[in-house]
Amino acid sequence: SDILEYRNENLKNAVGDTEEKAALKGLASIYHGIAVLNSKLDKISEAIEYYTKAMEVQTQLDDEVELAESLHNLGVMYMKIGKHQQALDLCTNSLKIYQSVYFTNQPPVIGVMIGNIAACYRNLGQVEEAEAMYKKALEIAERAVGRQHPQFALGLMNLGTLEINRQRFDQAEIYIRECIEIFEKCETPECDCDYYKSLEKFVYVLIKVNKIQEARDRFNKMFKIAVKEKFLDISWPNTYVLMVDCLIELKQFKLAHDVAM
């Protein structure tokens, strides 16, 4: 609050173009910082307000890279509140700016942007567009960090999730199995939320392709992690519902009861 007031005062007292530009840059930086803080606190409406203010100032400054970052972050906020078309428009505009600045030399952040655009398409039911974007994001991740990296594993999980949505479980298994293998080769800690989510999806797919023994073994590990790391509140219910049915069929009634509770 005090810093924001100070930046606004600087802008009022600025003399000449150089001072005014510096004051505007400082103001945009403060707006952006407040937006990021609100985003981390899950105060989405406040984050949207300040990302929008930052964008207005960045537009005056013709600061393309900073503007692209704010556009993308604003798009992510709209994704969080389910406004996927607005999110898609913002993230797409952000990507266009980045591509115009960097041309063919695409930094890893562009892969993240494309992944978010793919998620927007998926949430809008535009599955083929989502698949194309996820594959493009995966290519960028591979060029940036190689295949044996958690970032590449995340790209595989996104593709696997898309195949689950399409009920193409054989293909989903291929993607998510490789994803799990990469996480484990990288010695990803059990407390890593992305690793846990990939295990959830993997167990679900294994049940769907009738690999029940492997699904049960994987589930035992996953369930221990969920209890230990307190992930049960953020768990994907579909996996647990399917597994309870499997455990009952296997006559593992106690474990089925523990999972259901």
Image (cartoon, rainbow, N blue to C red):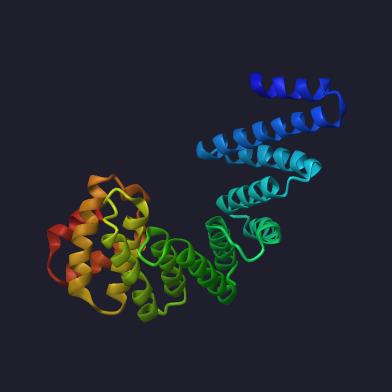
Q: Pinpoint residue 38: horizontal percent, then vertical percent.
A: 56, 36
Q: Pinpoint residue 116: horizontal percent, then vertical percent.
A: 56, 59
Residue 131 in sight in this render: yes
Q: Which quadrant: the N terminus?
A: top right
Residue 16 sits above or below residue 167 on the image:
above
Residue plotted at (38% across, 75% down): 172
Q: Give whichever of 40, 250 is nearer the camera.
A: 40
Q: Pinpoint residue 232: horizontal percent, then vertical percent.
A: 31, 50
Q: Is residue 87 left or right of residue 152?
A: right
Q: Give whichever of 118, 189 is nearer the camera.
A: 189
Q: Pinpoint residue 102: horizontal percent, then vertical percent.
A: 65, 59
Residue 1 in sight in this render: no
Q: Is residue 96 left or right of residue 190?
A: right
Residue 253 sits above or below residue 65 on the image:
below
Question: Where is residue 93, by image quadrant?
Answer: bottom right
The number of callouts visible is 0
Q: Give whichever of 113, 160 is nearer the camera.
A: 113
Residue plotted at (17% across, 66% down): 217
Residue 92 sits above or below residue 16 on the image:
below
Question: Where is residue 7, by image quadrant?
Answer: top right
Residue found at the far right of this picture? 16
